[in-house]
Each structure stands twice: as structure tokens, then as C-alpha cells.
Image (tube, helix red, strand yellow):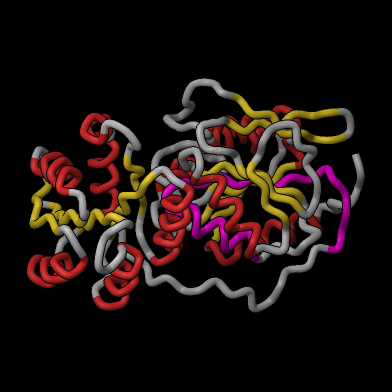
Amino acid sequence: MIKVLVVDDSALIRSLLGEIVKAEKDMLLVGAAPDAYIARELVNRFSPDVITLDIEMPKVDGLTFLEKLMKARPTPVVMISTLTEQGAEATLRALELGAIDFIAKPKLGVAQGIEEYRALIVEKIRLAANTKVKPRIKTEVSQQLVYKLSGTEKIIALGASTGGTVALKEFLMHLPANSPAVVITQHMPPGFTTSFAQRLNSTCKINVHEVTGGERILPGNAYLAPGNFHLTIVRHGSDYRTVLSDGDRVSGHKPSVDVMFNSLAKCAGENTVAVLMTGMGKDGAAGMLALRGQGSHTLAQNEETCVVFGMPREAINLGAVVNVLPLSDLASEVLSYLQRVNAGSRL
């Protein structure tokens, strides 16, 4: 039985989330707290397996409560955030502090919106309950990686979902300013990708952009798929360009890692190094298999360093992965491989 504590200053949200939890046979609602002080008492009394936590609360905000919780009593937390720029920034900070995942509150028609999210909420609570909370260590680049070659033809492709915001940040922070171009699909709603790209750009040596479509893919730059659009890569003369697609969900997601990987398999197979990182589900596995079939070097994050091993595991089971490595070793392996195969030749 999964013991769930709901923490939210909105009585309506507390009631709705509480009803969703109580309707599940494998879940037990141990309490619903309107603020951090009552939440602390309930945590000490019931030792919940999962906490849903609102970011915007009176007295003590959700981030302050989360930071103290992770130091005193590490517990799987699913953040309940708003679909605003401020909400996105706070959510990304929460994930850095140790939250497992987040669910965006609907802006209008809260009751109806929460009902529509029922399946997602239940899924994320179950996922969090089966996740071991890892202590968050501040990412520090003790030795900056060096890339001695030049050229625009090589592409590093990254796919991630649950836990990916922290994993991607660590990977990108290790890349030098002249790194080969990076394309990224991270499962995230619209607006959140804008804040995520800005956050990465402020901490990494390479330039990180949210894709708007039509960008020429150049070294020293990373291109992040925007929420609710698929990112595809196409050949354009002697270069590669970004193209956004407003199609249906693929592998349950939009943006989809499979869509990005499959596009690269068609136009840049041997020039691509693909990395599948932490995430729930199987998005990216089939696309990575297609990439490997076209001569790409394919890597997966290992189970020990993943928040959720779902996506890498599916790719490994398909035979799509050349090598499985800890998160801390992925960036160095990518650059080492590219230098080994003489990545400096121009198209």
C-alpha cells in the first residue's frame, strides 16, 4: 500500500487529489496539509511513501519545505506546479533539489483539468513510490573536457524524460564551448522548455536554445525541442537544419525522442552519437535501434544513476545500445568516440 500525503494550500486541489488517491486500491491517503507546518507534522507521524507538493504555499513555500525535507527525511516527491514562467522556474529548481517529477496544474477549470489528469497523477505517484531518492549533489566540473577537432557534420542526440532535467544539465555542463552540436528531446510541457533552455544556457559553456524551427545546426550549440512540438533534423545542402512538427503524439509523447532519433537515422546516421537517458516508458528505444542500424554510436545511462531506468532498459532490451555507462562518464565517452573516428572532416 502506497501511503500518500497531499500538500497544497488550495482546498479544492487537496480534495481532488485526495479523492484520486483514495479511489486507487493500492494507495492510502494519510493526510492532506494546507501548509508546510502541518505537512511536517504529518510526515513525522505517518512517514508517507510519496508526497504531492504544491510549490506556491503561504508561510513556507514548497521549495523551502522540499529542501528541508530532503535533508532531514528524503522522501519521493511529485511537485504540483502552475503552467507559468514562474511555475516552470520553481519546478526546475524543485527537480534539482530532489523532487522525482512534476504535474502541471491546469490554468482553467481546475476540477475538470485534474480529472483529465487522473491517470497521469496515479502513474506518477506509483512511479515515485518505486523510486529511490538520491541525494542531490551540486554539479561541479572538476575537469573540463576538451574537443580538438572542428566541423559541422557531427551531431550529439540526447533523449530523456523523468529525471532528465538534472541528467541533461550534468551532461551539458561537461561539454566545451566548441563541442559538436547537440539536439535534445526532453518530455516537458510548453513553457517549461523555454525556462529549461534558459537555465541550461546560463550554466553551460555551449549555447542552449529552445528550437523555433529552421535553425542551422552548428558546433557549440544545443537545440532543445519545445514542449508540444516534435523536433526533426533534415539535411539542407551541406548542413543540417531543425524542423518542428505539430503531429500526433508518438510513443505517448510530444515531443518524442523516437521522432528525433528516426529523423537522424534518415539523414545523419553515421554522423550521430545518440544517448538515451533516465526516463519512464519506452520512447526513444525504437528510434535508437534505427540509428544503430544506420551506423550511429549509441549509448544509454546505466540503472544505478537513472531516476527511472525505463527508457534505457527498453533500448538495451531491443539491442539498440552499444554501451551502457554512468551519467558522469557519458559526455567524455561521446567526445572520445568522436575524436577516435576523426570527427574533423567536413561534409
Corner quadrant of residue 99? bottom left
Residue 14 placement (x, y as % from top left): 16, 48
At a point 59% along the width and 53% down the height, the residue shown is: 323
Corner quadrant of residue 103? top left
Residue 130 visible at all: no
For this view, does 185 lie left or right of residue 51?
Answer: right
Residue 61 visible at all: yes
For this view, does 67 lie left or right of residue 16?
Answer: right
Q: Residue 154 magenta-drawn? A: yes
Q: Residue 303 magenta-drawn? A: no
User: Quick one: 90 or 231, which is closer to the camera?
Assistant: 90
Residue 172 placement (x, y as % from top left): 64, 59
- Furthest-top residue in view? 247
Residue 255 placement (x, y as % from top left): 53, 34
The segment highlighted magenta reads 148-173
At a point 21% along the width and 54% down the height, the residue shown is: 8
State the quadrant of the C terminus: top right
Q: How many marks?
A: 0
User: Quick one: 108 or 314, which is closer to the camera?
Assistant: 108
Relative height, residue 247 to residue 63 (above, below):
above
Relative height, residue 292 to residue 45 (above, below):
above
